[in-house]
Image (cartoon, rainbow, N blue to C red):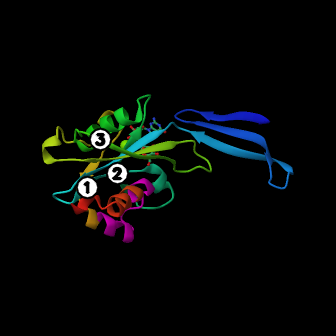
Amino acid sequence: MRDETLLSDNWGRLTRYDFDFRRHDGRTERQAREVYDRGDGAVILLYNVARKTVVLTRQFRLPVHVVGEDPELIEACAGLLDRQDPEAAIRREAEEETGYRVGAVEKLWTVFMTPGSVTEQLHFFIAPYEAEMKVSAGGGEEAEGEEIEVLEPTLERALRMIGSGEIRDAKTIMLLQHLALAGIMED
Ligand SMILES: Nc1nc2c(ncn2[C@@H]2O[C@H](COP(=O)(O)OP(=O)(O)O[C@H]3O[C@H](CO)[C@@H](O)[C@H](O)[C@@H]3O)[C@@H](O)[C@H]2O)c(=O)[nH]1
Ligand SMILES: [Mg+2]
């Protein structure tokens, strides 16, 4: 690493790195890349085998609006870790956003969503849910500006919403396809 320049340190931290990159042929070239660190996150897809439904959220996403697309994004429930371990964080987030207090959760993967510029690692979970687990309306933290609508489509309908372009969030598509591929709704 040759140089590290803090460009912005506000909600997240944007840093420019100047470094020497060694190519496979042995040549070294100087490169510069900007890296955005806004912490790690977790995401969970709740599913009900008897009703064949999943729990999704719909909320306004400014970056989507800024590029001129429909900003009401449909997503699996997700949140930043806020210094908690991933499982504790996703349980808190599931209850805040969807109103469901889940039991056992299953960890799937920890992946980079945007490795070209964002440091974030996202921890993926799934969990079964039942109507009795509903403890509040959900909707997110109003004080933090969140306004989250809770949707409960069937998995079949949600998979069709990927094809139609109604679902355009990568983590959500990964989780819906995992449920389908693993045959989790089939028993
Ligand atoms: N002041 C301020 N607040 C912010 C900013 N960005 C986010 N927030 C606040 O931080 C909270 C983030 O909500 P979470 O539910 O914890 O996170 P999320 O935005 O749903 O993020 C999840 O999805 C992302 C997108 O897929 C993931 O990148 C992330 O890891 C996480 O899983 C919200 O209250 C939001 O208002 C910002 O730039 N400034
Ligand atoms: Mg969230």
Figure label count: 3
User: What is the C-alpha distance between the residues marked 2 and 1?
Assistant: 9 Å
Nearest the viewer among 56 and 48 is 48
Q: Secondary structure at mark 2?
A: loop
- Mark 1 or mark 3: which comes first in sequence? 1
Which residue extends farthest front? 187
Find out whether residue 159 is within the magenta segment.
yes
Q: Amino acid at mark 3?
A: Ala
Comparing 125 with 33, the one in front is 125
Q: Give the percent coordinates (x, y) of residue 75.
A: 36, 53
Residue 177: x and y in percent read 37, 61
Q: Quadrant of residue 87?
A: top left
Instruction: Answer whether labels 2 and 1 touch (C-beta < 8 Å).
Output: yes
Query: Regarding ligand 2, which quadrant of the image does it lie in?
Result: top left
Front-most of residues 165 and 44? 44
Other-residue count near label 1 (Cα within 10 Å), few / some / many at <14 / 14–19 / ≥20: many
**Residue under the image location 80 percent in, 54 percent down:** 24
Whole-number angstrom distance, CA of label 1 to CA of label 3: 13 Å
Which of pointers 3 and 2 lies earlier in the amino acid sequence? 2
Q: Among all residues in the image, which is located at the extreme top?
A: 83
- Eyeballing the image, is 21 above or below 176? above
The amino acid type found where label 1 is placed reads Val
Residue sitting farthest toward the right: 27
Secondary structure mostly taken by the magenta-highlighted segment of the chain: helix
- Badge 1 marks a residue whose secondary structure is strand
Q: Which residue is mark 3?
A: 94
Task: Tell me which segment is drawn in magenta.
Answer: 158-173
Answer with the quarter of the image where residue 90 lies: top left
Asked whether residue 141 is in view, the answer is: no
Q: Residue 29 lies in magenta, yes or no?
A: no
Left or right, 52 with respect to 86, comes to left
The residue pinned by badge 2 equals: 76
